[in-house]
Amino acid sequence: MQISLEIDDLTNVRLVPPGPVLETVWAGRTLRPHAPYDAQRWQVQWRQGVAPRVARNGPVRRLLEVVSPRYEIVDLCLPSVGAGDLDDGLERLKQLGPAYYRLELGMNAAVRHLPRHVPRWTERLAEKDPRPRDELVDGVRRLHELGLRDGAAAAGADAAQRFIADRTKDLAAGGLSRMLDNLHPWIRWHAPVLTIDVPGDPPVHAPRPAGGRGLVLAPSIFATGVQYYFDGAQRLPSLLVFPIDPWTPYDRPARPKLDQLLGRKRAAMLIVLASADMCTSDLARSCGISASAASEHARVLREAGLVTTDRSRRAMHSITPAGTTLLGDNAHAQLPTQASGA
């Protein structure tokens, strides 16, 4: 995907905490049977603990049907992003009337072309009766209470604040270009286009205009990919949600020379391996790339003498002394350690 940013978009770029509603919606996506499992281990453990508790909760089940990764029927993220607390976010959702849902359902080709996948009850969201919409909002509240209130919400808020503080340093030191270029390994900035290189996505032939209303950037611990939201009514700014790790200290110094020497993804892999040996799948998750891409990058680093691979332990990769020397001051720039019990 490519997003073209006009001057009006660039002067209204905001990096904000996702807010509890957005995190809850993305947490719900991980509970669906067709969730994309490039998920991290803690997300799998969270799903295993929460899924039985919400299995028979009617409003939560309705919410999960609406936010399925296969066919997100309505956008509950863009209207609520940046809400100060759960009540504020839920109140924003309650203010969405039939016209909003009518537009969302009309824009969603799945409603017209994949009827066997889309629950027919969703058509009632666009009707005058507010009860289906109220039940959907109640599903967000209940999922947050059952699955996020005991710790995940605080972990997400803390991670977002650390990430935003680090990117603010980028903005002060290198301007908007550096900030945009350091959001995520899948996201690249080359003015005036923001490119999202999601593994497996088809090639892009033309950038999509952001619309001149600005761009909101929201880092999420529950996101398992990068997703772009566009307001069909052309009133709200666009929204880009991307994953961050709740356990990673984000106060890493900029490393442009290392990036230029190795490439961004190989530089990121070398920094991750400076903190711990990793198998290919864990390395891929830590760097936000596919397992096949991680394997290929590891091969290049291995041939350069920067990493070694022990194939007696399911291809465990380790940094070499030469790799540590090359990193220099960046050797501890990113330490993806998890809290005990995570």
Image (tube, helix red, strand yellow):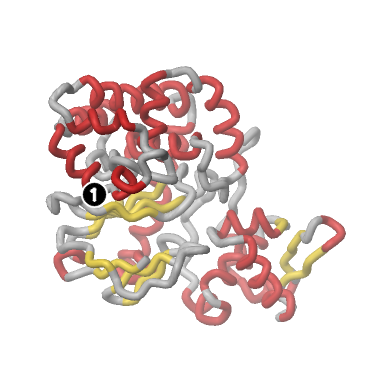
Q: Nearer the viewer, residue 298 or 324?
A: 298
Q: Position of residue 40 (x, y in %)?
A: 58, 46
Residue 248 visible in the displayed image: yes
Q: Position of residue 135 (x, y in %)?
A: 29, 22
Residue 175 visible in the displayed image: no
In which quarter of the view is residue 142 placed? Answer: top left
Specify the amino acid type for callout 1: Met
Q: How crowded is the residue under tag 1: few (<14 C-alpha within 10 Å), some, or many (20+)? A: some
Which corner quadrant holds the C terminus? top right
Who's the residue at 30% across and 28% down the image?
A: 121
Who's the residue at 34% across and 50% down the image?
A: 218
Q: Residue furthest right?
A: 312
Q: Is residue 302 above or below residue 225?
A: below
Q: Position of residue 45 (x, y in %)?
A: 61, 34
Which corner quadrant holds the N terminus? bottom left
Name the residue beneath numbered marker 1. Answer: 107
Left or right: 299 as drawn, with respect to 248: right
In which quarter of the view is residue 141 placed? Answer: top left
